[in-house]
Image (cartoon, rainbow, N blue to C red):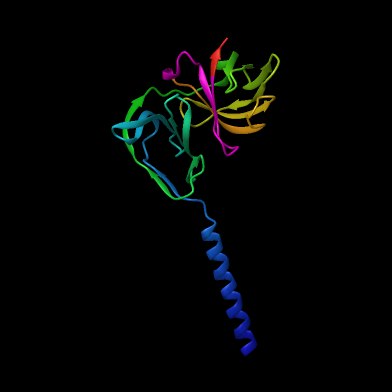
């Protein structure tokens, strides 16, 4: 009997220790002001020197919030899949909560790959250009020499976006494979859209111009 009690006590201790380890290894919690479905121009941070961005919200609970730096490049991307938690790239090291200072509704639209079918080019960090096209089926097809961008865009529940799977070859420090969104916004003119990915652990933000 004593041996049985000792066994169960040891097993319980191991179980509790395992639970504690899982808790310690949990990702930091990220919280963001929740807005109704739609598209919004938003700001956050210091009211005297706010950080501007755009917030895309779907009826299914999916969310995408892009905050830009002074060069209009993505500095932080907050996202939430339907039914999932908020996630942040670059990854946080501690729990964080983002409170929006302002939010103003903007035009929201449902995108299709066919409407974007044509040739485009993006400018890389090195200053070189990379050309590609999008066909009616949503395939991204590399064009020309040097950096080759390829992949796929597909329907998204988020307004003004398409889901994006992007492959890069010979493109400097761009990851070979990453996922995110193609984002269209009237405020991006003369750019047609931006290719925004984050699954590599680092942000990729490429502004595309129609050729």
Rendered location of residue 2, percent (x, y): 62, 89
For the residue pair 73 and 100, the one nearer the viewer reads as 73
- Does the stretch in magenta take in 126? no
Q: How many marks?
A: 0
Across and down, in percent, residue 14 comes to: 59, 72
Q: Observer-nearest residue: 85 or 58?
A: 85
Image side of residue 196 versus residue 107, left or right:
right
Of 35 and 93, which appears nearest the observer? 93
Q: Could you say which quadrant of the image residue 15 lies in?
A: bottom right
Q: What is the span of residues highlighted in magenta in the rendered image?
A: 186-207
Q: Quadrant of the N terminus?
A: bottom right
Residue 52: where, in percent of width, then height?
38, 29
- The C terminus lies in which quarter of the figure? top right
Q: Quadrant of residue 101?
A: top left
Q: Nearer the viewer, residue 190 or 85?
A: 190
The extreme front residue here reads 126
Whether residue 202 is visible, yes or no, is yes
| Residue under the image location 34 percent in, 27 percent down | 105
Say whether residue 101 is left or right of residue 206.
left
What residue is drawn where x is 60% and y is 21%? Answer: 126
Residue drawn at (59%, 15%), measured in percent from left and top? 121
Q: Is residue 116 above or below residue 1?
A: above
Rendered image quadrant of residue 122: top right
Furthest residue in direction left, as rendered = 48
Relative to residue 207, is residue 49 drawn left or right? Answer: left
197 magenta-colored: yes
**Position of residue 159 measured from the top left corner of the image (x, y, whole percent):** 46, 27
Residue 1 appears in the picture as rendered: no
Q: Residue furthest top?
A: 211
């Amino acid at each position: 009997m004593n041996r049985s009690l000792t066994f169960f006590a040891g097993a319980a201790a191991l179980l509790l220790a395992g639970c504690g380890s899982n808790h310690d290894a949990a990702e930091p919690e990220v919280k963001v002001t929740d807005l109704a479905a739609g598209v919004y121009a938003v700001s956050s941070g210091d009211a005297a020197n706010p950080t501007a961005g755009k917030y895309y919200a779907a009826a299914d609970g999916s969310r995408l919030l892009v905050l830009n730096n002074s060069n209009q490049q993505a500095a932080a991307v907050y996202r939430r899949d339907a039914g999932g938690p908020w996630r942040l790239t670059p990854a946080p090291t501690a729990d964080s909560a983002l409170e929006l200072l302002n939010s103003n509704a903007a035009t929201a639209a449902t995108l299709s790959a066919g409407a974007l079918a044509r040739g485009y080019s993006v400018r890389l960090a090195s200053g070189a250009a990379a050309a590609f096209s999008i066909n009616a089926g949503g395939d991204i097809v590399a064009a020309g020499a040097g950096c080759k961008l390829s992949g796929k865009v597909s329907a998204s529940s988020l307004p003004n976006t398409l889901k994006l799977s992007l492959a890069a070859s010979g493109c400097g420090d761009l990851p070979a494979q990453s996922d995110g969104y193609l984002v269209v916004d009237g405020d991006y003119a003369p750019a047609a859209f931006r290719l925004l990915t984050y699954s590599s652990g680092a942000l990729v933000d490429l502004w595309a111009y129609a050729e």
